Amino acid sequence: MRIDNEKNRIYISAGSVGCLVPSVVHLQETPTEIVIAVTGAPSSASSGSPCTAQKVTLVGYVPLDSPVDGHRIVGNTA
């Protein structure tokens, strides 16, 4: 994760774990926190063949409505 205070963005990367591949990034901003959640979907490899080891499959950024300033950044995957 990298924070760009000039463009109000948080750059992220997420990797596949087991047979789940990251597909959607959810962002919620509150007055004190920025919550980022990455959700996944089953990979096409999960239909009978072994799943790959963890690798980065999603790279991008989330735009913020306001500067990061003193917000606490919270992240999780599902």
Image: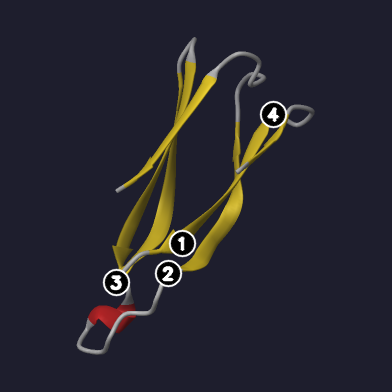
Residue 34, compared with residue 57, is above or below; it is above
Q: Amino acid at mark 2?
A: Gln
Q: Residue placed at 67% from the left, 19% from the top?
A: 67
Between marks 4 and 3 in the image, the one whose residue lies nearer the viewer: 3
Q: Which residue is mark 3?
A: 19
* Position of residue 49 measured from the top left corner of the image (x, y, whole percent): 26, 89
Are there few (<14), some (14-19), or many (20+) residues within 10 Å of tag 4? some
Answer yes or no: do the residues labelled 1 and 2 have beta carbons within 8 Å? yes
Of labels 2 and 3, earlier in sequence is 3
Residues at marks 3 and 1, CA–CA distance in whole angstroms: 11 Å
Are there few (<14), some (14-19), or many (20+) residues within 10 Å of tag 3? some
Q: Which residue is mark 1?
A: 15
| Total marks in image | 4
Are there few (<14), some (14-19), or many (20+) residues within 10 Å of tag 2? some
* Position of residue 33 measured from the top left corner of the image (x, y, whole percent): 47, 19
Give the quarter of the image for residue 61: top right
Between marks 4 and 1 in the image, the one whose residue lies nearer the viewer: 1
Answer yes or no: do the residues labelled 2 and 3 have beta carbons within 8 Å? no
Residue ranking furthest to the left: 48
Answer yes or no: do the residues labelled 4 and 2 have beta carbons within 8 Å? no
